[in-house]
Image (cartoon, rainbow, N blue to C red):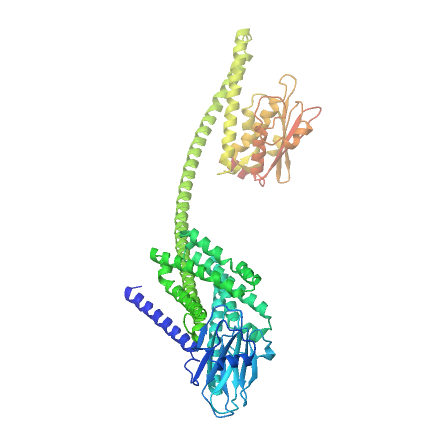
Amino acid sequence: MSLIDHGLSQALRRTLWGWLCCWCVLLSGCGVWMPQHDFTVYASAKSAELFSPDQALKSYLAGAFERKDTGFGRGYQRQPMWLAVQFSSSPPGTASVVSVGPAILDSIEAYTLDATGHPIFVGRSGIGVPRQSRSGATLEHSFVIKPERPGPTLVLLKVKSSASMAVYAQVTSAEYQLESLRLQGLGFGILFGLMCACLATAGLAFLRSRNGRVAVWLAQTGAGLLFVLCFNGMLSILLLDFSLQAYSWLLTTSGALMLVSVVLFMGRYLSLAEDYPRLHATTLAMSWLVIPVALVMDALGWSLFLGLALVLLPTMACMGLGLLLQTLRGHPKARSQGIWGWLLGAAFIYQYGGKWGYWSFGAFNMTAWQYALFICYCVILVDLVRGLAQTHGRARLRRQHLQAQLMAERSSLQEKVLAGTSALQTLHEDLRREERAQRDLLLVAAQEFQPPARRIRRLLDDLRLRPGSQQSNLAERLRNMGIAADRLQFLANKLISAERIDELTIHPEFHAVSVTEWVHEVLHDTVLFIHTRGLEHVQGVQVSGDPVLLRIALQNLIDNAIRHTDAQEGSVSLEVLQHPQEIELIIADQGPGIPDSLRPHLFQRYTNAQRKPGHGLGLSIVAAIARSHQGQVSVSDAQPHGARFHLRLPSLPTLSGAESSKTNAG
């Protein structure tokens, strides 16, 4: 916002508040500028003790009454005060209205003079008088006077007040009094409605914000509204008949609550609790003394309101000191809104000065503090709501900024995740290539291990069978060489098995494999003689599989049978059976057999059936290869002892002789 816009906004707000103040003044003083009769007010001396209207009339005629302005005060006075209101004569039978205020007076008795000059009773009013017995009780106490004789009219008023002996009187015609009451009722109704609107707005602001400062202001607004209603006598006039003592306590309690809430609010609003903690604590302690001091005053027979006044004045002085200190210190709230606090303080001081008789007053002077209080309510409430709106706006902007940051971070994080995922995928591909190269190297090495191992084994067998080769030294060397050859071939088979199984999970390679060629190839590399049966019945039968993996599976089953069979006393056999759409290979040995406890786990990794050399991987590799070919492997007992392993694989449809020869040739 530019400086020009800011200045126009400030000027507009000040203009609106100025018109509001003028409107309040016009409504409050409407009774002052209404056409009135010429009248004069006299009051009995402060020390005079007059108990009857005859005594009051006699004292007035003797010149003991003092002439007063329209309104005046005498502070807190126990005994009643008599007023004599004399106004210009009217035609006999013409009604005039004598109004006495404020509404908080305990009781007012009105007397006029009959044709013989003796006092006659007109009516009673006040908050201490039952409602059905009151005469014209509104915001003022009104008495209708009809002169019975020509000439000046004299009205005697007996006034009792426990709050303060401060009264004002005025005389108007009945028509103008009715119009005045309408305007005063309109003004008070608007004031009361706006204060209720302030209370509702503060309540909504608190429900929306849950702010401690707004909560204290809500309590202060409620207490102020209750005090205004009590001060204007509205609770007694409109709602219930209170006893004078009960109403006095209600007014004192509401004033105490308003004072405490104002001190608490100023401690938060002007930061007095943080900047001047001792001053704030002293002010708060004094505000809590209203009820105790009122109890002391009541026990001594004095007015309860005297206790409220004794505490209110020093408390307001401390609050004014705090406002002054914060203004000099440059506190933004004190500098911008402090003028309204000074206005309210001035209104209270003016009212109390009038009550104690330092200056005269009228109806407006008695109610000016209420309008000043209302203006303060509106100004501070607008400031609080504006502050909450600004805070909410800043919070919304910050939330939007954080959301934008979060979206940016999220987008950046997604990009980082995608980049990291791409890098991991690239690394994974590199690792797969490296593993594949390593696997190929191991396969080549394993393939190269097998032929020399088989040749070494055959040469050893030939040497062992030649004449003269059974010399002890040569036999021991041949035996050691045989063990080394067996170990070399065993390691080659294991390398091929492990790497081909890993490769199977990535790139399986299936071909049509002849069963007879498959079995003969494996038996050709076997050291021990294997008894075979059924090969002649499966000529031309083929299975679909990976030739290398099928060779590994059958080789592992035969090696397992050889390891568990005694070479001198036992034998190993291989039987081939053809079933519908299936080929079964049965490898039987004459070893110790498989215990029942190991059979559920026999084809799992690292399961070794007997205490023989091995790592428990061979049968698990066979089971994995069988599953990958949609086959299965199982075990049963051999007779009289040993184990039988059954390898079942799906067979391909049988080919004709020409097709079989072409396939084998290919």
In-front residue for pair 660/544: 544
Q: Position of residue 384 (x, y in %)?
A: 43, 62
For residue 73, say whether it is visible. Answer: yes
Tell me if 433 is positioned left or right of 623 in this view: left
Q: Is residue 59 above or below residue 578?
A: below
In-front residue for pair 458/437: 437
In-front residue for pair 511/482: 482
Tell me if 593 is positioned left or right of 403 in this view: right
Q: Position of residue 371 (x, y in %)?
A: 43, 71
Q: Position of residue 551 (x, y in %)?
A: 54, 30
Q: Residue at x 50, y 69 (%)?
A: 164
Q: Is residue 309 above or below residue 125?
A: above
In-front residue for pair 474/463: 474
As drawn, the residue found furthest toward the front would be: 62
Q: Is residue 39 above or below residue 316?
A: below
Tell me if 74 is positioned left or right of 133 in this view: left
Q: Position of residue 131 (x, y in %)?
A: 59, 77
**Which of the 4 image quarters holds residue 541?**
top right
Numbered circles on residues, count: 0
Q: Quadrant of the N terminus?
A: bottom left
For residue 217, say whether it is visible. Answer: no
As drawn, the residue found furthest toward the right would be: 640
